[in-house]
Image: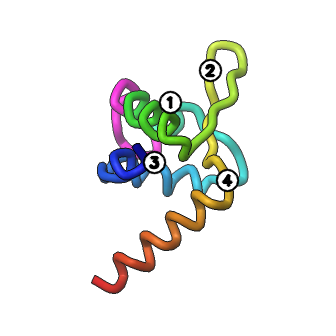
Amino acid sequence: MVGKALSNGNRLELLELLEFLAQGERSVEALAKVSGLSVANTSRHVQQLRQAGLIQGRKEGLKVFYRVSGDDVVGLLDALRHAVSYT
């Protein structure tokens, strides 16, 4: 499931945005705005990332705020960046 979640460039970008914005959580609407994706498309990608355990959500009222699940996901992103720099 993690491999499938990481196989899409938009999902990788959303993960990197959440990592970069790690000082706080972001809603789907905020992620859509910074990524340039539609809210509906962003929501679908976020659900796949969440199902894979790469991000976590916290509900506040009607909104859900997302963040990277933990340091292991940050390490995975670093390893991917490192591996890509060798190609």
Residue neighbourhood size for the residue with mark 3, other residues' Cα within 10 Å, grouped as few (<14), some (14–19), many (≥20)? many
Q: Looking at the rendering, which quadrant does residue 45 occupy?
A: top left
Main SS, magenta region, reads helix
Q: At label 1, which amino acid type do we have?
A: Glu
Q: At label 2, which amino acid type do we have?
A: Lys
Q: Is residue 21 above or below residue 83?
A: above
Q: Which residues are magenta?
A: 33-41
Residue designated by label 3: 14
Which one is in front in this view, the residue at disc 4 or the one at disc 2? 4
Residue neighbourhood size for the residue with mark 4, other residues' Cα within 10 Å, grouped as few (<14), some (14–19), many (≥20)? few
Q: Earlier in the sequence, mark 1 or mark 2?
A: 1
Q: At label 4, which amino acid type do we have?
A: Gly
3D distance between C-alphas at marks 4 and 3:
15 Å
Q: At label 3, which amino acid type do we have?
A: Leu
Farthest front residue?
A: 1
Q: Secondary structure at mark 2?
A: strand
Q: Secondary structure at mark 1?
A: helix
